[in-house]
Image: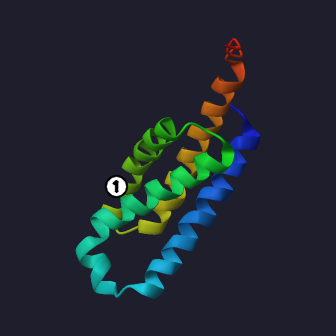
C-alpha cells in the first residue's frame, strides 16, 4: 500500500465531501435531502471520488468501484442514524483503496513504447 497516496486520498476526499456538502446545504432546503438524499448523497460521493482520482492520477473506473464499495458500510451507518460517522469510515476505506491501487500501479512494469 502506498501510504502517501492513502493519506492524500483521505485529505482530498474529506475536503471534497465537506465542500460539496456545505455548498449543497446552503443552496438547497432540508426537504430536498429528505426526498432526494438517497441519490444526491451517492452522486456527490462519486463526484468527489472522481475528483480525488483525477488529482492523484488514479484510474477513474477502479476509483469509482472503490468509492462504491467504501459506501456500503457507510450506508449501514446512515440506517443507524450516524451519517457523518459513516462518511468518515467510508473516507478511510476509500483512501486505503486508493493507496492499494497506487501500489499496484507502481509495481506494474512500464508499458513498452509504441
Q: Residue at x 67, y 17 (%)?
A: 108
Residue 27: name its quadrant.
bottom left
- Give the quarter of the figure containing the C terminus: top right
Quarter location, residue 82: bottom left
Residue sitting at the far right: 4
Placement of the N terminus among the 4 image quadrants: top right
* Residue 105 point in image, percent of width and height: 65, 26
User: At x 71% / y 50%, what residue is drawn?
Assistant: 8
In the rendered structure, the answer to whether residue 41 lies left or right of residue 36 reads right
Horizontal side of residue 114 vs 46, given as left or right: right
Q: Residue at x 62, y 32 (%)?
A: 100
The residue tagged with tag 1: helix, strand or loop? helix
| Residue 109, placed above or below residue 1 | above
Which residue extends farthest front?
114
Indicate whether 33 appears above or below 78.
below
Residue 61 appears anywhere in the view: yes
> At 69% from the left edge and 11% from the top edge, which residue is drawn?
112
Residue that carries the numbered disc 1 in the rendered image:
76
Is there any visible trace of residue 80 in the rendered image? no
Label 1 Cα neighbours within 10 Å, binned few <14 / some 14-19 / many ≥20: few
**Is residue 81 positioned above or below 114 on the image?**
below
Q: Residue 87 versus residue 45: which sits nearer the camera? A: 45
Name the spot of residue 33 as percent of width and height, x first.
Answer: 32, 77
Would residue 73 be found to the left or right of residue 56 on screen?
A: left
- Residue 85 drawn at (x, y percent): 49, 63
Question: Would you say 78 lies left or right of 109 here?
Answer: left
Residue 70 point in image, percent of width and height: 45, 46
Amino acid at each position: 500500500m502506498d501510504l502517501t497516496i492513502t493519506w492524500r486520498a483521505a485529505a482530498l476526499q474529506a475536503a471534497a465531501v465537506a465542500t460539496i456538502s456545505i455548498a449543497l446545504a446552503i443552496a438547497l432546503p432540508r426537504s430536498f435531502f429528505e426526498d432526494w438524499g438517497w441519490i444526491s448523497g451517492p452522486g456527490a460521493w462519486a463526484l468527489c471520488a472522481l475528483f480525488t482520482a483525477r488529482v492523484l492520477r488514479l484510474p477513474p473506473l477502479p476509483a469509482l468501484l472503490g468509492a462504491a464499495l467504501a459506501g456500503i458500510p457507510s450506508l449501514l451507518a446512515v440506517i443507524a442514524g450516524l451519517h457523518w460517522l459513516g462518511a468518515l469510515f467510508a473516507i478511510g476505506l476509500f483512501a486505503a483503496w486508493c493507496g492499494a491501487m497506487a501500489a499496484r500501479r507502481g509495481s506494474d512494469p512500464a508499458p513498452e513504447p509504441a
